[in-house]
Image: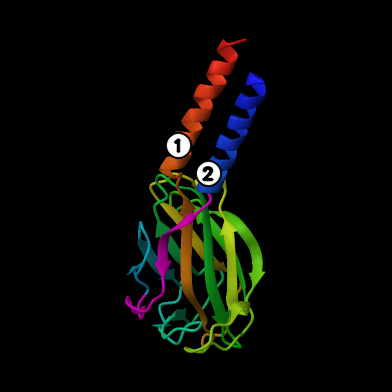
Amino acid sequence: MKSRLLATLLAACAALCVSSAVRADVLAHWTFEVTVPTTAGPHAAEAGDVGGQATGFHTSTATVYSNPVGNGSLESFSSNNWSTGDYYQFQTSTLGYHSIAVQWDQTRSSTGPGTFDLQWSDDGVNFLTLLDDYNIDAISWSSLTYNPLSTYGPIELPAAANNKANVYIRMTSQVTSASAGTNRIDDVIITGVIPEPTSLALLALGGVLLRRRRESR
């Protein structure tokens, strides 16, 4: 009876720990409604517990950055003159967080680049691919109406992205498009999970119960 009670308590602790630790916090959220992105940046995240910076990179010096309507919003981050390897980049810190994930909206003009890789790095130099050659349809956006067909993710990063001083996420073009072709991005959200205090307390209680069970044998 005592063993069964201890086992039940341990199972309850484990279940409560899991259920109380699954809430994802927003680390950084770029809406581009405040930091109007008419340059390559950096553009600060408008929301989130940690914050971060958004930038764009193009090899062409003729690239023009602009802020047309977003996906159900007034602003987005847009640019033209795309070459293979050009990218949008989003940086934040994941210190104290795990289960890092990213979600974003993206579209293009009819002649804009439509094939990208989603990549991540913890040093801003060496990048690993999360999504290879994902496709972007040319979907018209409206400031008044959100189109879910333009939303990608959430995509979870590997455990190696947990608890890092810096994490960089890139959407990198895999094609070269017409010079006037544009690609735009909006509503970029990076999330992470931090254990709730109740989870830590329950986990400690579970450890005490397990230790007492072993000592009683």
Residue 21 visible to an observer of this rendering: no
Q: Where is mark 1, residue-wise?
A: 200
- Out of 102 and 127, give the one closest to the viewer: 102
Mark 1: amino acid: Leu
Whether residue 204 is situated above or below residue 60 in the rendered picture: above
Residue in the picture at 45% in, 37% down: 200
Please tell me the numbered disc located at residue 160: 2
* Image location of residue 73, percent across then percent down: 45, 83
Left or right of 138? Residue 75 is: left
Above or below — where is 158 with respect to 62?
above
Who is closer to the viewer here, 24 or 151? 24
Task: Mark 2 and mark 1 in contact? Answer it, CB < 8 Å.
Answer: no
**Where, by quadrant of the figure, is residue 66 drawn?**
bottom left
Camera-side residue of 136 and 100: 100
For the record, the magenta segment spans: 22-39
Residue type beneath disc 2: Ala
Q: Is residue 47 visible?
A: yes
Cα–Cα span, label 2 and label 1: 22 Å
In magenta stretch: residue 179: no
Q: Residue 134: x, y in percent?
A: 65, 68
**Badge count:** 2
Report the side of 1 relative to 192 (left or right). right
Taking depth in this image into account, of 187 and 85 the one nearest to the observer is 187
Q: Where does residue 119 sit, x and y in percent of width and height?
A: 55, 58
Q: Residue at x 55, y 44 (%)?
A: 159
In the rendered image, the vertical position of residue 43 relative to residue 145, given as above or below: above
